[in-house]
Image (cartoon, rainbow, N blue to C red):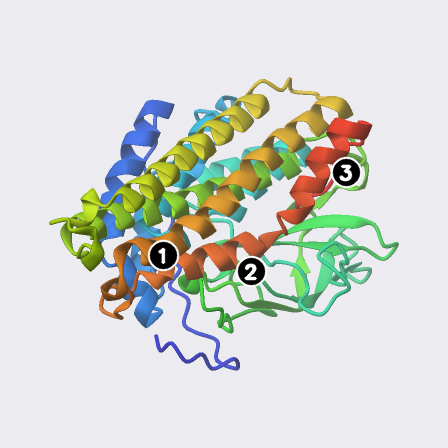
Amino acid sequence: MSAVIDAQRTPVRRISPRSAQRIASDEQALQVAHALAQEFTQGAAERDRERRLPFEEIERFSHSGLWAISVPRAYGGIGASWNTVAEVFKIISAADPSIGQIPQNHFGNLNVIANAGSEAQKRFFFEEALSGARFGNAGPERNSKNVLDVRTRALLDREAGDGSYLLTGTRFYSTGAIYAHWIPTRAVDDDGQPLFIYNRHDAAGLRVVDDWSSFGQRTTASGSVVFDGVHVPAAQVLHVKDFLRQANNIGPVSQLIQAAIDAGIARAAVRDTIEFVTTRARPYADSGLERASDDPYILRDVGNLKLRLHAADALLERAAGVLDALPEKITFEQMAEASVAVAEAKVLSTELSLLASEKLFELSGSASTLAVHNLDRHWRNARVHTLHDPVRWKYYAVGNYALNGTPPPRHSWS
């Protein structure tokens, strides 16, 4: 696929038959993630440079069984801890953060179903996930007032008379849609009430457009999804008006995954800094040293990066622990505590991913900027992914909660 994107082209989507192994434990999930990461690291720079969409890699990723680890035990999964889920995202994102980001909405949607789906919907969609189905995303509107302004409409199909809907709208930032068997989206009904709608990838009137042209996270293909009168059976619609008024973990879980991806990018940047300094960088002429790795200023900065990396890992683990400790039915106070804990982790993972990916060049020298290494992908990926929601508002949320007891906003970006 060319790096020059034709916004009018709809690519052939390689959606394979569903197939997935079953993972039996959190420990096995981490082992499988490490094995896949070794594989995905190979070719990550080339995939980014050429903008080669990782269809084969995504097949292996979902076939591994990792995409189903959050399915609750009551429905055949292992109900993996959020700490394990975050670690899996971090491991894969350190290898290739575009691949790491692609299932973020898959896990978010499984969490929505666990919280807001009917019993029949849980049984059906969880079995889909266990069988290897991938859930993508049709993200926010590109031209709406903000990410919470939903203009996509799902109108009751009164002619059909069976509770089904007709869905119309255009969405963007649709990470994972091009690889997905199911493409969920938010919409509002005839009365302006919120719905979560799960669309089959091959539904008539649904079109995925590969018009993602960002300089980072290039192979997520987070472009447009067009719904043109898509018929949606009632069983594929979640009515979430009442649910969204209740305390829930949807926002903190979504943000935890985002922070884990950033932590993975930071880990990769620190890893490649150390590798380049020890194997390729030359010492500065005035240092009188034989090796760049003996430069006291480089030693100081690498030490600082490692310290911050460990701190980011610790905050991420702490935030996941807060989520894992939540009871099945939570209070608004517990929801606020979880959001703040995740916000603290996201501040550090955001800032470190940017710092580490920029320090890489300062410490490694001019040779590290050569195109053959494509090390600028770390900064490009960090810069783009951390724009998902502005970290300046995380500082505000943490401070406002500490000083005034004001809880963070209750939505998926908080």
The amino acid pointed to by label 2 is Ser
* Whether label 1 touches label 3, CB < 8 Å: no
Residue at 25 percent of width and 46 percent of height: 274
- Give whichever of 212, 271 is nearer the camera: 271
Q: CA distance from mark 1 to mark 3?
A: 34 Å
Residue linked to disc 3:
244
In the rendered image, residue 408, in percent from the top left (x then y), is placed at 74, 36
Q: Of the residues under marks 3 and 2, which one precedes in the sequence?
A: 2
Q: Could one spot residue 257 in this view of the protein?
A: no
- Give whichever of 351, 157 is nearer the camera: 351
- Judged from this view, the residue extending furthest toward the right is 191
Residue at 35 percent of width and 43 percent of height: 301
Residue 174's disc is 2
In the rendered image, residue 102, in percent from the top left (x then y), is placed at 45, 52
Q: Of the residues under marks 1 and 3, which one precedes in the sequence?
A: 1
Q: Of the residues under marks 2 and 1, which one precedes in the sequence?
A: 1
Residue 16's disc is 1
Residue at 78 percent of width and 49 percent of height: 194
